[in-house]
Amino acid sequence: MAIKKDKVGTVTGANLNPKSRGKKGGLTNSARVTGTNTEATEESKPIGEKFQDSIQTVGAAINTVNNTVSTIQYYASQVQGAIKGTANDSSPLAVTDGKINSAEILAKATAEIDESIGKLEGGEATRRNIIIAQQRNYVGVATNNVRLQQDIATLNNEQKRLIGLLVDGKTLDINNETKAVGYHRAVTHRDTEISALEQDRELLTHQRIRTEGTQQQTSLVRDQEQLKIQKMKEEVDKQRFEIENLQHEKEVIKQQVAAKFMAGF
C-alpha cells in the first residue's frame, strides 16, 4: 500500500512564503530575510533554562540507550558463553560463517509507520533545530572557555615546571662548584702531603748522614777509650812505684836511725 506523504512541514522550503524562497536564510525563516521576529514562546525562555530542558531530554535518551546497551551486552555475553564452549571459539567463522543472513534480517524489518513517534512540521522542526544549534553554540563556547582555562592552568603548571628546572640547574651549578672546591682542596691536601713526604725524606737523609758519622766515630771512640784505660794503667803504675819508693826511703831512714843509735852506745 502506497503511503501518502504530507508536503507540509518539509525542509525543502515548500512551506515558506513565496517571497522568502530562494533567498539566503529563507529555509530557516531567518529574521534578516522575513523582517519579522520568528522566535516563539519556546525561544522566549532564557538560554540557561532551555539548555537545562535539552539536558533533561538528552539525559532521558541516554538512560534509554544505556538500558538498551545493557540488554545487548547481556545477550552478547550469553552468545559469547555459547561460543566459548565450542572447539572453534577463537574463530569468528565458527558463528557467522563469514556471511550475512539477509533473509533473517529482512524478516524482522517493517515499512509500516510507527504512529507512536511524534511529528513536527518543517518550520517548527527548523526553528527547534536553530534553537538546538544556538544552544550547541553556547555549549561549544562554554566548552572552549573551559578548555582555555585548562590550557592556562597547563601553561601555569609548565611555567612552574620550567622554574623548577631552572632552580634544579642552579642547584646543579652550586653542587658542581662545591665539588670543584672539594677537588681543589683534595689537590691541595695531596700536594701538602707530597711536600711533607719530601721533607721527611730529606730529614731521613740527614739522619742517615748522622748515622754514618756515628758509625765512623765508633772506632775512634773505641781507640779513645782504650787509650784512656792505658793512661789510667800508667798512672796506677806510677803511683805504685811512688809508693814503693816512699816505702824504700822510709826503710832506709829507719835503718840509718837504728845504726846511729847502735853506734852511740
Image: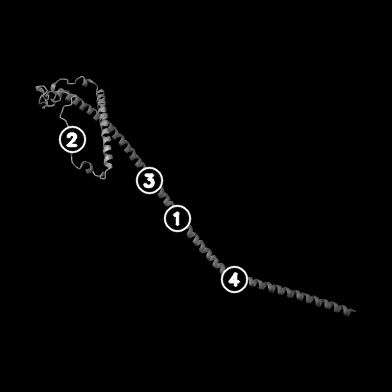
Image spot of residue 98 (x, y percent): 19, 42
- Residue at mark 4 to residue at mark 2: CA–CA distance: 135 Å
Residue identified by numbered label 4:
220
Secondary-structure class at tag 3: helix
Relative to residue 216, is residue 79 drawn left or right?
left
Where disc 2 sits, the SS reads helix
**Secondary structure of the residue carrying numbered label 4:** helix
Pointer 3 or 4: first along the chain? 3
At label 2, which amino acid type do we have? Ile
- Residue 5 in the image: state x and y as whole percent: 12, 25
- Residue under numbered circle 1: 190
**CA distance separating discs 1 and 2:** 93 Å
Which kind of residue does numbered mark 4 sit on? Answer: Leu
Q: Are dots 4 and 1 in contact, CB under 8 Å?
A: no
Foreground mark, 2 or 3, reads 2
Is residue 21 positioned above or below 243 on the image? above
Check disc 3 and report the residue beneath it. Answer: 172
Looking at the image, is mark 1 or mark 2 earlier in the sequence?
A: 2
Name the disc covering residue 105, or none: 2
- Cβ–Cβ below 8 Å for labels 4 and 2? no
Is residue 25 or residue 225 the one in the foreground? 25
